[in-house]
Image (cartoon, grey):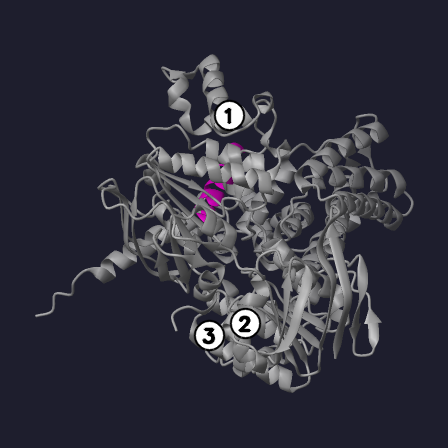
């Protein structure tokens, strides 16, 4: 299903010159990938928690805090800034994971509270103002064009997705993560260490979100204390387009990759064709509705019934 | 060789298992039997690291082991097939077989894993199942076989199978038995927990029987018969003499069930029930007894057959229609399918009769209170607890509220209850039995499913025994019945 959504969007992307009247440039692809770089890490962070049957709402808070920490601490050494952001993200994630696993609290209220708290914390650090990042060398470096369409930022994001794909698809850890999303009781009985996995999971989602925030703030040369709900919503859209089920247990990082690319390309199509901004939202909604409807059990049952009724019809052979 | 020595565990001061000891030799298949509440599950949980014993020792090989978690038990070489189906439908067959296996490599070696699973499946006679197939494409029986295959393939020193065949067909059971024998022949010890006594005698070398948390005996199967085993399990078996409520041909046929089937669960069930009588369905897990109730209540989406209540056909597969025709169903799972736990007792009592105290769609709280009070009195709930959340009540009182909800309604004609006194103390149990008797006397058909022999014999005017999705015997009110007779039907079936 993620492949279908990506295919539809790629075809639309390829056809966009028909509307804009100018042929596609490598720069258009580069821009789409930059959009992907911005969205990808939060989408992956929320996606893997959904695969494991949890839901990490705090990613936007970690994302904002990560950006703020990176610009505050990374002026002379950008690596140090990223490190500070990632360390904070990991620590916040681990603390949330421990609460959720050990006290058996649902992840929604815990991560919602963390999200709000982190926004407050970020606000306190910044005084509620955007904080600029003076090291313009770093800003230029992270967004420089590589091979015509890539940047270090988009390449790094892609690399993280590939690592996630290998871990989830090819290791015992990945199998166990998908198992606890599919059926937690059965996983416990089978001998999966559920609590440890949940803690690790939230640590990773916090880390990824903070990394995404840090890279974005380097790219914008400023950190925004309140990114709003847009990143969370787009990340969730990307995850759902990527075939992740809200019930848990289903979805792959490559599906998430396709979902995130779909969202980024769609935004770029709107930019290329110079359609008004609100079209983006309408297109997201339409794509999401179609993809989710195609997969819905109700539709499948309808189709099955339809097929069965055709098969039941008496054959009129003479 | 596995030695279990003086294993004891209590819950809230009530002993569930006290001083149970037995030994399972290398290569031995050891049966573990007991009636409900005998302590089998508690013993299994202690052996698999899901519960820690209060005292006692478990020795595997020559070393005493402490099994504090499922992982610790696995490291000590204990594999488990749980009573409940414990597979993950979202994963493939092969992934399920390797899930939680501490010997599985950290990074999958796809070919090696595939070959390993292929070999295990072939050994079980499951050549038709591919390890890369999603588990959700298999039938429930096949999923159960995968779980057994998984446990048998872990190269454990002790494999525990807790009711592994309850949901399997005879052919499937036969291949499971062959696989168990093959694994035992490699020197692995097997503990086989089952209520299918004929199977236990066929498969096991010796059988340990528990009753009320204590060990009664360990006997070589050569010296046992099904009846001897039942006597060990029950002690003094409960009985019912030909009762006052003889079949009465003047009573109207209220509920007619004919040709009721649920694929994979219920083969064929027909019963004609009179108003004013209590019908007991006696059947163990997987016997189909509770499926009869669920199907009549419209809760089995795949059920077929006809149900008539007072000569009006009740559509199967439609719970709302069943309720409208006057079928009230009380699930054995009060918590998820019965009560609104965080709402008050009064709220729960009146939840299914809102139209009675609404005027033009608006609820009249004062009228609601009057009705709730009356119902509380009828169902024996203290009036001052009407405002308390149901979750704060004891199991017995919760069940009373549950039953009370169906009482005093002139639009309910049949009351179906699955395990009406599960988790209820003795006092509550008597009160609930009384409630049901009164409901029957008021002209309702009462149909309940239970595994409790005492309850079946005390409450049932007609007792219908079931096994493998069909009726074994029917005992009307004019015959003597005892626990041994019922157990034989429920565990051995049609000879």
* Location of residue B486 with respect to B326 vertically, above or below: below
Front of the two marks 3 and 2: 2
Decide if residue B430 is on the left or right side of residue B246. Answer: right
Which residue is rendered at x = 41% and y = 23% of the image?
B354
Identify the element where label 3 is drawn: helix
Residue ID for mark 1: B376
Let me know if residue A276 is in the magenta part: yes
Tell me if residue B151 is in the magenta stretch: no
Residue farthest bottom in this picture: B185
User: Upstream in the sequence, badge 1 or badge 2?
Assistant: 2
Q: On the image, numbered disc 3 is attached to which residue? A: B172
Residue assigned mark 2 = B228
Q: Main secondary structure of the magenta part?
A: helix
Residue B446 location (% of width, % of height): 38, 42
**Which one is closest to the eye, mark 1 or mark 3?**
1
Mark found first going from the N terminus, 3 or 2: 3
- Look at 63% across and 54% down and name the residue there: A184
Q: Decide which of A261, B30 is in the foreground and name it.
A: B30
Name which quarter of the figure residue A124 lies in. top right
Q: Is residue A271 visible?
A: no
Picture coordinates of residue A254 (x, y %)?
60, 59
Q: CA distance from mark 1 to mark 2?
A: 46 Å
Between A34 and B27, which is closer to the camera in this rendering? B27
């Amino acid at each position: 299903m993620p492949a279908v959504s990506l295919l539809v969007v790629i075809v639309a992307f390829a056809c966009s010159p028909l509307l804009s009247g100018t042929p596609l440039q490598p720069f258009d692809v580069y821009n789409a990938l930059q959009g992907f770089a911005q969205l990808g890490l939060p989408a992956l962070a929320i996606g893997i928690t959904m695969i494991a049957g949890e839901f990490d709402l705090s990613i936007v808070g970690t994302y904002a805090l990560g950006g703020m920490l990176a610009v505050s601490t990374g002026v002379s050494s950008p690596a140090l800034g990223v490190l500070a952001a990632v360390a904070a993200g990991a620590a916040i994630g681990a603390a949330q994971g421990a609460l959720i696993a050990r006290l058996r609290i649902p992840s929604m209220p815990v991560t919602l509270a963390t999200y709000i708290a982190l926004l407050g914390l970020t606000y306190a650090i910044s005084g509620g103002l955007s904080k600029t990042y003076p090291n313009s060398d770093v800003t230029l470096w992270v967004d420089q064009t590589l091979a015509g369409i890539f940047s270090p930022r988009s390449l790094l994001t892609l690399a993280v997705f590939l690592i996630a794909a290998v871990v989830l698809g090819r290791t015992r850890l990945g199998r166990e993560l998908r198992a606890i999303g599919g059926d937690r009781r059965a996983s416990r009985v089978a001998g999966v260490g559920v609590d440890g996995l949940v803690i690790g999971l939230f640590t990773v989602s916090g880390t990824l979100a903070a990394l995404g925030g840090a890279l974005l703030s380097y790219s914008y040369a400023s950190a925004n204390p309140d990114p709003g709900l847009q990143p969370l919503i787009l990340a969730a859209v990307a995850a759902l387009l990527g075939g992740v089920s809200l019930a848990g247990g289903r979805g792959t990082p490559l599906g998430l990759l396709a979902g995130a690319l779909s969202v980024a390309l769609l935004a770029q199509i709107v930019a290329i064709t110079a359609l008004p901004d609100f079209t983006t939202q309408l297109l997201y909604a339409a794509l999401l509705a179609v993809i989710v409807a195609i997969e819905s059990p109700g539709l499948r049952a309808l189709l099955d019934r339809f097929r069965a009724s055709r098969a039941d019809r008496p054959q009129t052979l003479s | 060789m596995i030695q279990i020595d003086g294993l004891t565990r209590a819950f809230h001061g009530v002993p569930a298992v006290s001083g149970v000891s037995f030994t399972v030799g290398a290569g031995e298949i050891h049966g573990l039997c007991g009636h409900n509440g005998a302590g089998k599950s508690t013993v299994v949980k202690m052996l698999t690291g899901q519960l820690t014993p209060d005292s006692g020792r478990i020795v595997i090989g020559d070393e005493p082991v402490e099994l504090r978690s499922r992982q610790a038990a696995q490291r000590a070489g204990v594999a488990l097939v749980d009573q409940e189906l414990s597979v993950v439908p979202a994963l493939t067959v092969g992934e399920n077989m390797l899930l939680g296996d501490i010997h599985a490599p950290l990074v999958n070696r796809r070919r090696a894993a595939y070959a390993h699973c292929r070999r295990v499946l072939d050994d079980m006679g499951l050549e038709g199942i591919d390890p890369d197939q999603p588990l959700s494409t298999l039938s429930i029986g096949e999923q159960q076989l995968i779980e057994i295959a998984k446990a048998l393939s872990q190269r454990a020193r002790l494999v525990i199978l807790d009711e592994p065949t309850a949901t399997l067909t005879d052919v499937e059971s036969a291949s499971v038995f062959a696989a168990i024998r093959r694994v035992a022949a490699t020197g692995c010890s097997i503990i086989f927990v089952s209520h299918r006594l004929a199977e236990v005698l066929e498969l096991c070398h010796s059988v340990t029987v528990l009753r009320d948390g204590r060990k009664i005996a360990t006997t070589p199967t050569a010296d046992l018969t099904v009846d001897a085993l039942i006597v060990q399990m029950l002690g003094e078996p409960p009985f019912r003499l030909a009762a006052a409520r003889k079949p009465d041909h003047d009573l109207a046929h209220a509920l007619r069930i004919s040709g009721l089937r649920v694929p994979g669960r219920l083969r064929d069930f027909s019963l004609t029930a009179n108003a004013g009588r209590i019908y007991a369905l006696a059947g163990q897990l997987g016997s189909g007894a509770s499926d009869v109730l669920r199907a009549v209540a419209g809760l089995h989406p795949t059920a077929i057959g006809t149900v008539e209540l007072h000569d009006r056909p009740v559509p199967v597969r439609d719970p709302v229609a069943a309720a409208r025709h006057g079928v009230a169903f009380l699930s054995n799972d009060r918590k998820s399918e019965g009560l609104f736990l965080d709402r008050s007792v009064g709220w729960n009592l009146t939840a299914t009769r809102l139209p009675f105290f609404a005027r033009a769609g608006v609820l009249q709280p004062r009228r609601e209170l009057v009705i709730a009070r009356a119902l509380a009195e009828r169902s024996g709930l203290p009036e001052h607890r009407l405002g308390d959340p149901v979750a704060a009540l004891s199991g017995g009182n919760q069940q009373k509220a549950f039953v009370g909800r169906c009482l005093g309604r002139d639009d309910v004609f049949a009351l179906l209850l699955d395990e009406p006194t599960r988790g209820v103390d003795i006092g509550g149990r008597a009160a609930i039995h009384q409630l049901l008797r009164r409901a029957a006397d008021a002209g309702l058909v009462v149909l309940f499913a239970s595994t409790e022999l005492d309850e079946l014999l005390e409450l049932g005017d007609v007792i219908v025994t079931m096994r493998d999705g069909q009726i074994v015997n029917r005992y009307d009110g004019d015959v003597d019945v005892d626990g041994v007779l019922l157990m034989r039907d429920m565990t051995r079936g049609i000879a």
